């Protein structure tokens, strides 16, 4: 797995995490609706560790209070905010594929991007990049029409805001990144801290042996190797190099905060600087910010 050279800075790495993912009908959802609730405590703890936050935009999880609270907490910590759009699939947490055409994908992604960026603008911040969620993220690895719809949404919002289009974060080799580059967008590659990789650099599908790495020491060592361009062990025991500009640490697994801290500490101990791949953006509420 190899990313474009301009996406990778050997001196630094970005850590991203999915946040603001309150689900309707859960205690977390109810808590988010309380007056002056603030961010979810787990999210706040992760924002002290990561450098980029992929914030749910309401279609698979999250709501306006969670968007508001998360962007404020991210801005306070200098964490870059990314839109994390999905299919309209709250019932399944965005994990079920939808057979939509290019225009339909563009509409749902643009709507979610606008929702989150308006929340950010209200608090003097801005969205800095786009990373689709769940089934949509996986679909646009290979589906050119839906991938083009995501790119269309980013371009459409850039035209309305009268500014450069946002970067798109995705898997190395994904069709969406090729479509992004073709349209003049920055395509940014990511790896996963706790996922197993095949010899060809693709992820081991969930449900198969070796798909998820649970040992914290092993996860930390693999992240350091990926961040420094060294080999990790693939699912068949062979070596593979996984290079990316950003590494995702999952926030919805038990012990996520401790694991994220362990990963960050290991990177810092190895002399790897941590920095957002897309710098946190600010701007007056209701006006375009600067990147």
Image: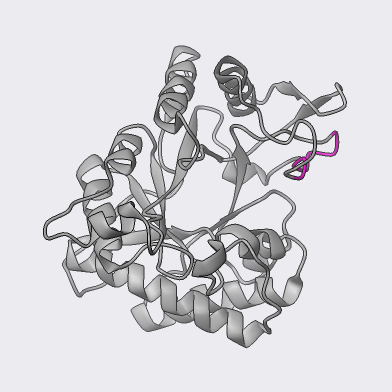
Q: Is residue 202 magenta?
A: yes
Q: Is residue 272 magenta?
A: no
Q: Nearer the viewer, residue 166 or 224?
A: 224
* Magenta stretch bounds: 199-205
Q: Identify the residue shown where x is 40% and y is 45%.
A: 52
Magenta span main SS: loop
Q: Quadrant of residue 35?
A: bottom left
Residue 123, above or below 287: above
Q: Position of residue 29 (x, y in %)?
A: 32, 58
Q: Quadrant of residue 269?
A: top left
Q: Identify the residue shown where x is 66% and y is 35%.
A: 195
Q: Position of residue 83 (x, y in %)?
A: 43, 62
Q: Is residue 202 visible?
A: yes
Residue lying farthest to the bottom in this orientation: 103
Q: Nearer the viewer, residue 246 or 186?
A: 246
Q: Position of residue 165 (x, y in %)?
A: 47, 69
Q: Nearer the viewer, residue 217 or 160?
A: 217
Tell me if 129 is positioned left or right of 202 in this view.
Answer: left
Q: Identify the residue shown where x is 39% and y is 48%.
A: 53
Q: Is residue 163 visible?
A: no
């Amino acid at each position: 797995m190899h990313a474009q050279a301009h996406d990778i800075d050997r001196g630094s790495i970005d850590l991203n995490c999915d946040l603001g993912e309150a689900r309707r009908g859960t205690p977390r959802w109810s808590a988010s609706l309380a007056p002056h609730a603030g961010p979810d405590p787990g999210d706040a703890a992760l924002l002290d560790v990561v450098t980029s936050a992929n914030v749910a935009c309401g279609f698979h999880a999250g709501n306006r209070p969670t968007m508001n609270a998360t962007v404020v907490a991210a801005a306070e910590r200098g964490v870059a905010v990314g839109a994390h759009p999905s299919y309209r699939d709250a019932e399944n947490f965005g994990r079920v594929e939808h057979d939509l055409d290019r225009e339909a994908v563009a509409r749902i992604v643009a709507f979610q991007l606008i929702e989150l960026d308006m929340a950010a603008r209200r608090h003097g911040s801005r969205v800095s990049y786009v990373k689709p969620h769940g089934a949509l993220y996986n679909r646009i690895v290979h589906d050119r029409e839906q991938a083009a719809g995501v790119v269309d949404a980013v371009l459409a919002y850039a035209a309305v805001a009268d500014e450069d289009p946002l970067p798109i974060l995705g898997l190395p080799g994904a069709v969406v990144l090729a479509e992004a580059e073709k349209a003049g967008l920055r395509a940014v590659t990511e790896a996963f801290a706790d996922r197993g990789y095949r010899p060809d650099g693709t992820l081991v599908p969930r449900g198969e042996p070796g798909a998820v790495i649970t040992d914290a020491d092993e996860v930390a060592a693999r992240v350091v190797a990926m961040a420094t361009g060294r080999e990790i062990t693939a699912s068949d025991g062979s070596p593979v190099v996984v290079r990316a500009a950003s590494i995702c640490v999952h926030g919805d697994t038990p012990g996520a905060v401790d694991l994220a801290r362990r990963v960050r500490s290991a990177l810092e101990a190895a002399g790897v600087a941590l920095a957002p791949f897309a710098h946190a953006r600010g701007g007056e509420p209701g006006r375009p910010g600067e990147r």
